[in-house]
Image (cartoon, helix red, strand yellow):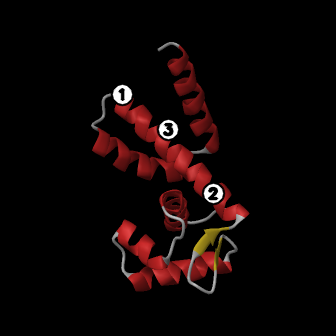
Amino acid sequence: MKIQESAENYLETILILSEKNAHVRSIDIANELSFTKPSVSVAMKKLRESGLITVDDDGFISLTAEGLSIADRMYERHKLLSDWLAYLGVPRDIAVEDACRIEHVISQESFEKIRAHVTEMKEHF
């Protein structure tokens, strides 16, 4: 299933926050992304209806297996591309910002080639 970039960003943010905190709520996401609470609430409703997250009675948000799969893929791309661009000499803040955009549009085939190249480079250093 192809989902929008904004949904991928939300899922990735939920994953990152869940690694830092025991529970994730909409307000945590709003604070992390500097979005309004109503905007995040609308997005969470769409993600829930798409089967990508669950929200319990206390408002705690969890990724479903499918949501986790998407979030993991985006986060892996983000980390690898950020590190790779920084290694190439791009200032870290710009590398992170650029990786954030690239991770959503790069094909899986191209990403796998970059990952293989980075892995090979690491073996030599």
Label 3 environment density (alpha carbons within 10 Å; few <14, some 14–19, many ≥20): some
Residue topped by disc 2: 70
Q: Check disc 3 and report its element: helix, strand or loop.
A: helix
Q: Residues within 10 Å of mark 1 (few under 14, many from 20)?
A: few
Residue at 37% x, 46% y is 96
Identify the residue at image location x=43%, y=81%: 39
Residue 53 lies, in percent from the top left, at: 64, 72
**33 relative to 66 in the view: left or right:** left
- Between residues 39 and 32, which one lies in front from this camera angle? 32
Q: Earlier in the sequence, mark 3 or mark 2?
A: 2
* Image-based side of 33 in relation to 125, left or right: left
| Res. 80 mark | 3
3D distance between C-alphas at marks 3 and 1: 12 Å
Cα gap from disc 3 to disc 2, whole angstroms: 16 Å
Label 2 to label 1: alpha-carbon separation:
27 Å
Residue that badge 1 annotates: 88
Q: Quadrant of residue 57?
A: bottom right
**3 and 2 marks in contact (CB < 8 Å):** no
Residue 39 against residue 3 in the figure, above or below: below
The tag earlier along the polypeptide, 2 or 1, is 2
- The quadrant in which residue 44 appears is bottom right
Residue 72 in the image, given as x and y percentages of width and height: 60, 52
Q: Earlier in the sequence, mark 3 or mark 1?
A: 3
Q: Amino acid at mark 2?
A: Ile
Q: Residue at x 38, y 66 (%)?
A: 32
